[in-house]
Image (tube, rainbow, N blue to C red):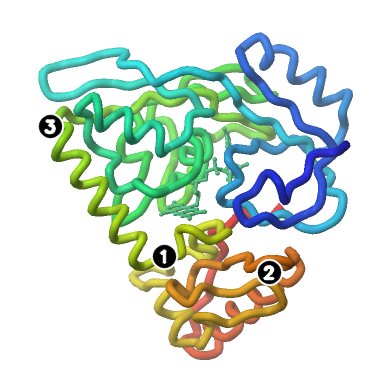
Amino acid sequence: MEPSMAERTTLGFGGRALAEAVIRDEAGLDALPAALSRLGGEPMALGRGSNLLARDGLLNLVLVRAAKAGEPEIVAESGESARVRASAALGLPRLLSWLAAQGLSGLEGLSGIPGGVGGAVAMNAGSYGREICDKLASVRIFSLDRGMVELEREKISAGYRRFDPGISGFWLVWEAVLLLDKDEPARIKARMREVHDKKKATQPVGSRSAGCVFKNPPGESAGRLLDQAGMRGARLGGVGFSDLHANFLVNHGGGTSAQALEIMERARLAVKEMFNIQLDREVVVI
Ligand SMILES: Cc1cc2nc3c(=O)[nH]c(=O)nc-3n(C[C@H](O)[C@H](O)[C@H](O)COP(=O)(O)OP(=O)(O)OC[C@H]3O[C@@H](n4cnc5c(N)ncnc54)[C@H](O)[C@@H]3O)c2cc1C
């Protein structure tokens, strides 16, 4: 049976991909090019599916999932800081609690983001002014073009929800090395709790969503614009913008990705009409 996108995404929408390649070690990466040419379709890296809106029907995609197990490890250390290597497959929440226990600070602002390390790097995930690439030292990326390469942060162009390693064709984040500052575990945990509590009060964290669906325009909040354009709580079938945060699209059950795309288009037009501001998608539509 082809892999279900509804089962692989937090929004829970979408049809099926052609196939899925789960890569557990580097030998699996060596075998990937031949497997992809055998399977056909377009390869697509899949993390935890927490920023994806999959269309209905059969998608011409082969999902490629980095699945190397294992804990993060400290690979270098000085008096004030440490470098930590984390596999792309590791969940960001797991990484953050491990860092807190080790007394390593810098990513607390990313608390509550449910993606994997690979997806967080590929999206340059962030919140409250902190982004994962602020703390990235280097990344190992596998691509069909160049095989495995290690890129230092300076070689990568990254910005607000943008990460461009300058590699053409399909590529997969395999591991990241992060540079963190030493601090007291209790202080780090307190900062994480603060971020978490703030998100719980202002975002529908328990609902099926993909986080914010539109990017914030420069100097503006997409949530505020959507709210003022009347989209807070607006629904179409089983899909709707959250009552708690107007930039979170929620699957209330029984919704389809066609409904999700339609209500997003209505929201985009409403904001364009009211403010003459163009909203761009943050959620990746596949
Ligand atoms: C409740 C909730 C809250 C959220 N809050 C935030 C937030 O505060 N800030 C924020 O930035 N995001 C937020 N998100 C969105 C999402 O969690 C992040 O974008 C996350 O980093 C995506 O990681 P993922 O592993 O789920 O990636 P996926 O959704 O699986 O993929 C997202 C994109 O990354 C690519 N990708 C995934 N893994 C890899 C890899 N190993 N190599 C190369 N490319 C890859 C995919 O091809 C796709 O283009 C939220 C989502 C939810 C559901």
Query: Considering only order in the chain, which callout, 2 or 1, is on the residue closer to the N terminus?
Result: 1
Give the x, y percent position of residue 208: 58, 59
Query: Is residue 51 shown left or right of residue 223?
Result: right
Marks 1/2: CA distance?
18 Å
Helix, strand or loop at label 2? It is helix
In the figure, residue 57 lies in which quadrant?
Answer: bottom right
Q: Which mark is residue 260?
A: 2
Helix, strand or loop at label 1? It is loop
> Image point 41% across, 65% down: which residue?
203
Give the x, y percent position of residue 55: 76, 57
Residue highlighted by disc 1: 203
Query: Considering only order in the chain, which callout, 2 or 3, is on the residue closer to the N terminus?
Result: 3
Q: Looking at mark 3, is its residue's CB closer than 8 Å to ligand 1?
A: no
Marks 3/1: CA distance?
28 Å
Residue type at mark 3 is Glu
Query: Is residue 29 shown left or right of residue 77?
Result: right
Residue type at mark 1 is Gln
Say few, some or many: other residues with alpha carbon within 10 Å of mark 2 (under 14 / 14 to 19 / 20 or more).
Answer: many
Q: Which mark is residue 184?
A: 3
